[in-house]
């Protein structure tokens, strides 16, 4: 019986290794909350999150500046945000107020965006109102901030665009940090007074100096700046900055080219501590990378297909599934035991550049490798898997490539960053040198640092450094057949070096 069991196990292992069977993961459930217009979309979002509420927040559905500060106010009272026109109550707003049994409405914005007539209609429904407004968008945000308080900190965002505010809206609401809208190069008096009169433990500044200048940020206490090369990178960097505060079991998807659906959804996202991920008509590489590396069971899509298309949703949900099982025509090669570092040193004078010589020398130290891995995991929000680009990027920064953004998170992005710096892309393995950055096929699916050939006369097995040391006895310095594809490992596609 024991021999038969061993035989069966042997057959199964042969089939698994030879044919490369993969198990498909379940695709996340996508839930689209969208209607014929922004008001119907808002209504669907409210239906999803609230059965009843004593409070509601009303904002203008077409005027983003005043509305952006509404999310923190809504969360303070666990209230939904209702979009409305300027002159009268929308039918969807009336329906939701009645369904929820609302007793008090907070209006964000002056009478130019939500008129006195709207307020009169609410009073006629025996609903009390309170308005938060100012002479301009900044004063309106300060008015809300005074209601929320600043004991948990504040968030500074530009007064000329909405995407950064929407990126942080749900976590700002959860943490009860008011969003203050400011110009790029000046601090309005109302904001200065807020800073003087309030205790502010931390100030988060969204965007680089081209969005909010250092002059402005210098007027605030304990500044932490969150920036990125574009709105999508800033969106992901903002989420990563607060990754320990989010519940990633669900992710909310919002259209980056209009504020209304994301604003409505920010209250729902805050209610459930979920992040808001921004997408346009296509998916930015940094966004794709983020989605691929997060485990979530639900994807809430705010708005109809005029914004976020079905193709975009399908791409993001399908990226969470492995490929269907496909037979591989090649068996695995004879395994090679991962050896410790070779005792004979590598001649790093052959490296393509001084930076890559530094990279080789840095990664030759075990403590350095572990430190790089720890930082890679930290940059990935504590996720211990799929950290290869974070690992390589961090090692490069420590070796002299200091301007490489920490937000680079996928192989396409890393390749692009290196090309922008004049690096060469090469496929001739005879040109591989210590410290070169290698990329595999299929995406590329992986990246690692080349250290040296096991046999200088044979371009197959090499010593490399990457984030996969857990597969090699905990040693990030290990052997890999760089030129042979197996069921589990892709072959090299190209490598890059500094000229």
Image: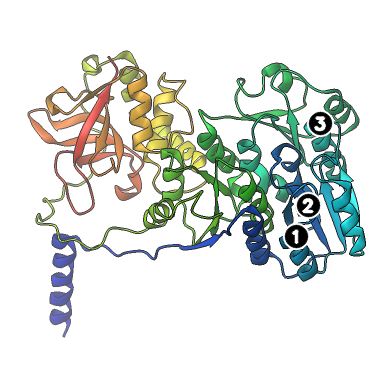
Q: Residues within 10 Å of mark 3 (few under 14, many from 20)?
A: few
Going by the picture, which residue comes out furthest to the bottom? Answer: 1
For image coordinates 30% across by 35% down, the residue present is 448
Query: Compared with residue 52, is residue 304 higher up or lower down, i.e. above or below?
Result: above
* Local secondary structure at mark 3: loop
Per the model, the C-alpha gap separating discs 2 and 1 is: 9 Å
Q: Is residue 361 visible?
A: no
* Local secondary structure at mark 1: helix
Q: Which quadrant would the N terminus be assigned to in this image?
A: bottom left
Q: Which residue is mark 3?
A: 136
Q: Which residue is mark 2?
A: 58
Q: Earlier in the sequence, mark 1 or mark 3?
A: 1
Q: Which residue is mark 1?
A: 93
Question: Mark number for residue 412?
Answer: none
Query: Compared with residue 417, is residue 325 higher up or lower down, i.e. above or below?
Result: below
Query: Compared with residue 180, is residue 404 higher up or lower down, i.e. above or below?
Result: above
> Mark 2 or mark 1, which is nearer to you?
1
Q: Residues within 10 Å of mark 1 (few under 14, many from 20)?
A: many
Q: Are marks 2 and 1 in contact (CB under 8 Å)?
A: yes
Query: Compared with residue 83, is residue 25 higher up or lower down, i.e. above or below?
Result: below
Q: Residues within 10 Å of mark 2 (few under 14, many from 20)?
A: many
Relative to 70, is 162 on the left or the right?
Answer: left
Q: Residue 425's spot in the image, x, y percent?
A: 24, 25
Q: Residue 146's spot in the image, x, y percent?
A: 87, 40
Relative to 241, is 118 on the left or the right?
Answer: right
């Amino acid at each position: 019986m024991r021999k038969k069991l061993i035989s069966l196990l042997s057959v199964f292992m042969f089939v698994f290794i030879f044919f490369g069977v993969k198990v498909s993961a379940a695709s996340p459930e996508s839930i689209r909350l969208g209607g014929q217009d922004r008001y119907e979309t808002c209504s669907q979002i409210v239906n999803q999150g609230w059965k009843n509420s004593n409070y509601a927040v009303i904002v203008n559905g077409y005027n983003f500046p005043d509305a952006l500060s509404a999310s923190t106010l809504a969360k303070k009272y666990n209230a939904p945000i209702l979009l409305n026109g300027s002159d009268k109550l929308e039918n969807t707003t009336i329906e939701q107020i009645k369904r929820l049994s609302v007793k008090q409405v907070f209006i964000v914005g002056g009478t130019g965006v939500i008129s006195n007539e709207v307020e009169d209609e609410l009073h006629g429904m025996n609903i009390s109102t309170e308005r938060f407004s100012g002479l301009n968008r900044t004063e309106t945000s300060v008015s809300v901030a005074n209601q929320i308080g600043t004991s948990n900190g504040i968030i500074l965002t530009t007064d000329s665009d909405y995407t950064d505010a929407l990126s942080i809206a749900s976590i700002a609401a959860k943490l009860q940090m008011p969003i203050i809208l400011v110009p790029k190069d000046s601090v309005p008096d109302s904001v200065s007074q807020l800073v003087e009169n309030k205790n502010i433990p931390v100030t988060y500044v969204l965007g680089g100096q081209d969005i909010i200048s250092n002059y402005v940020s210098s007027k605030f206490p304990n500044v932490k700046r969150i920036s990125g090369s574009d709105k999508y990178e800033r969106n992901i960097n903002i989420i990563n900055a607060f990754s320990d505060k989010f519940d990633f079991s669900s992710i909310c998807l919002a259209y980056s080219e209009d504020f209304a659906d994301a604003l409505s959804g920010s209250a729902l996202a805050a209610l459930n501590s979920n992040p808001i991920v921004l997408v346009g008509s296509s998916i930015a590489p940094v966004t794709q990378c983020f989605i691929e590396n997060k485990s979530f069971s639900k994807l809430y899509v705010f708005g109809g297909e005029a914004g976020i298309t079905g193709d975009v949703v399908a791409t993001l949900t399908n990226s969470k599934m492995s490929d269907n099982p496909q037979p591989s025509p090649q068996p695995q090669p004879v395994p090679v035991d991962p050896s410790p570092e070779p005792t004979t040193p590598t001649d790093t004078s052959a490296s393509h550049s001084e930076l890559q010589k530094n990279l080789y020398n840095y990664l030759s130290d075990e403590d350095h490798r572990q430190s790089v891995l720890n930082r890679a995991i930290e940059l990935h929000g504590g996720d211990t898997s799929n950290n290869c680009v974070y690992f390589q990027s961090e090692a490069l920064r420590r070796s002299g490539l200091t301007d490489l953004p920490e937000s680079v998170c996928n192989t396409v992005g890393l390749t692009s960053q290196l090309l922008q710096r004049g690096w060469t892309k090469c496929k001739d393995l005879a040109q591989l040198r210590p410290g070169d950055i290698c990329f595999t096929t299929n995406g590329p699916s992986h990246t690692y640092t080349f250290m040296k050939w096991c046999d200088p006369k044979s371009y197959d097995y090499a010593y490399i450094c990457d984030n996969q040391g857990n597969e090699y006895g905990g040693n990030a310095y290990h052997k890999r057949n760089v030129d042979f594809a197996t069921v589990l490992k892709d072959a090299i596609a190209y490598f890059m070096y500094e000229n």
